[in-house]
Amino acid sequence: ERVRAGNTVPGKTASSAGALTTTEADAQLQFRFWCHAIVPTVTKLFSLYADSTVRDDRLVLSLLVSIADTLKQVLDHDAYLPSYNDPDEEHLLFLDCLTKGLQLFIRKDKNVSTSKNSNAKDQKANAFISSFHYLILLNHRLVHERLPDVISFSCAQLHPVTHFNHLKKQPKCQANELLSSIIKIYRELRQMKHLLSSTRKAFLVSKVCHRESESLQRVLSCGNIIESLSTAYQICPSGQIHEIWEFFDAWTLEITRRGGTTNDDAAGSNERDSSTELSFCVQMFIIFIRNVRTNKQNSTEIRTFSEKTMASSVATLLGNDISIESISARCDYFLRQGLNLCGWLVDIHTRACFWIENFHVSYHGSYSLLSQDSSENKNFDVLAYLQNVVDMSLATDHYLDWKNSYLKKYWKSASDDDSQRQMEDAQIPLHLRASLQRLALHRIHQLHSMIYYSKRDEYEQIEKEDENPSVASNLLVKEAKMLVNFSVYLASFPTDRSSSCIGSESLWSSLVQSLGIWIQYSDSFHVDLFLVWFFSALCQSNNISTNGTIQLHHTDKATAVSLLRDASFYDIHQLSASFFTIAIKFAMRHVIGTVDSVDQSSETVLMLRKKLSHGIDQTQ
């Protein structure tokens, strides 16, 4: 009241009292009242955790909830703001002590889960998470140096991903909201490097606290968190791209060197932890690469970064001497992650080269990125390895039989069992199929860009009446068609079933994502087979199933529905030309299967089946 009346506060001069606004004075009074009110609660909580022999779970839960609820009141009523006058930072120090105490408690993970009641355990964890959430909203400095502990603990509270909930992604929970707020705050502060470094340290914290390192992988299934990360990278200042890129490059190299280079029959927990950390690191690196925006100013720099990573991280993951013979000596998870990273490096390298003027295109030149002319890595040629795999796969009798007779047998077969008898598995390791297909699709994108520039140069040579015009585009088109054959061939067979629960991806979905590019180098067989998958996915039940050799992933139905609602899908003339023909044949085939399930001895059924089969032949 004295402040409102313009009088001085006891012990304060007129000038110092005038420096305090009414809002700040009221806020300071509220905050000090909260401090005095919460001190007994905090003291009691600290004493309970200090004496592990005496523990009342109900009392501990009540104290934690009281702290979280009162922190919410402090936040809602602006009782503390970093901009308020805080002599000697007394208020900040009080909050810092509270935060430090909570950090010590969550480091003792067993203390959080002492209760046998899972509901009480969840309530305890939520109380801790809520308290950290309100504290970081009050002042991010309170959690800035404690981010590894907060991230590790929050990820452990996320829901495990299974086939059932993977379709809906991670359900919203308090841990999800806390992680989203952390990313948003550090995105606005332009301190993504610190956030990433803390995430890296969270793996060590999880190990110290005896938490599962796989829990950090759950973040990758949180759609809102991935979206927030994507936004942060899209608006990332050009000056920070370099340090973030080097961070991921160094992290990948460190894990690879720590995890070893060969398989070990007696692999222990350290190898499993390295595998999990490497998978997380590569996926985070890929999210960064996918969302970095290339432009005329940063194109040269990004092209240099991608070439450097190709010669360092990817070369270490795949082995400097990459060949069909030496590939079997590498760790499975090294190969998979190396090929995944390599594919997206090709993608961003192609996008960067688009902005470079007067850039020379050569088949084994710097544009391709997959071939290294450096004497240090003269044997490291991913392009040669990819071509060898493609050539070996497309030269087998199995592939030729698949290409020439699969659809014919599919239309003539009355059931999925009949069409499945003629199929054998592709002769490519299960765990590498998705990675090789993704690399092949990125290579098709790169070839598509190279073909454009090559044809432009060829037209200029023709206009100049050059006696020996270049025909490089023909070689590039030929390779693109081979890679389309390979990509569709792989999609027709199962991927690694062991990874189908978390982080798996449908090979058909990968084809959908780059449909507009690879369809230009396809033939009628690829188009018809893609449409058969499209209609099979639309008819898919909620369970994972197969339709003959058309392998259906649990996300394929959602992908097909998205295509169905996309107007640009019908603008692709290669697909629209065969759309209704395949739709009618597909419907007739399923009607035949329904008729056969009734009474095959009936003369009417036999006649109807004969008519439908004749209709399919006429449609062809």
Image (cartoon, rainbow, N blue to C red):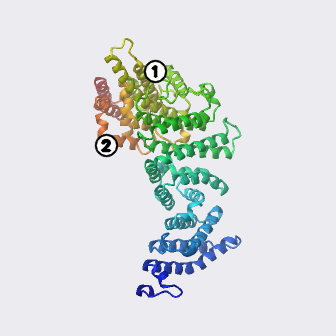
Who is closer to the viewer here, 618 or 446? Answer: 446
> At 52% from the left edge and 38% from the top edge, which residue is drawn?
305
Q: Which disc number belongs to residue 401?
A: 1
Mark 2: few/some/many CA within 10 Å (<14, 14-19, 20+): few
User: What is the C-alpha distance between the residues marked 1 and 2?
Assistant: 35 Å
What residue does disc 2 label? 565
Dividing the image into 4 quarters, which one contains the C terminus? top left
> At 55% from the left edge and 64% from the top edge, which residue is drawn?
141
Residue 253: x %, y % from top left = 62, 41
Query: SS class of the residue under badge 2?
Result: loop
Who is closer to the viewer here, 205 or 381? Answer: 381
The image quadrant of residue 294 is: top left
What kind of residue is marked 1?
Answer: Asp
Residue 423: x %, y % from top left = 48, 27
Query: SS class of the residue under badge 1?
Result: helix
> At 62% from the left edge and 68% from the top edge, which residue is drawn?
101
Dividing the image into 4 quarters, which one contains the N terminus? bottom left
Does the rendering let one see residue 596? Answer: no
Q: Which disc number belongs to residue 311?
A: none
Does the rendering let one see residue 297? Answer: yes
Image: 548 above or below 565: above
Q: Tell me: 311 left or right of 469.
A: right
Nearer-N-terminus badge (1/2): 1
The image quadrant of residue 509 is: top left
Mark 1: few/some/many CA within 10 Å (<14, 14-19, 20+): few
Who is closer to the viewer here, 426 or 424? Answer: 426
Residue 553: x %, y % from top left = 45, 40
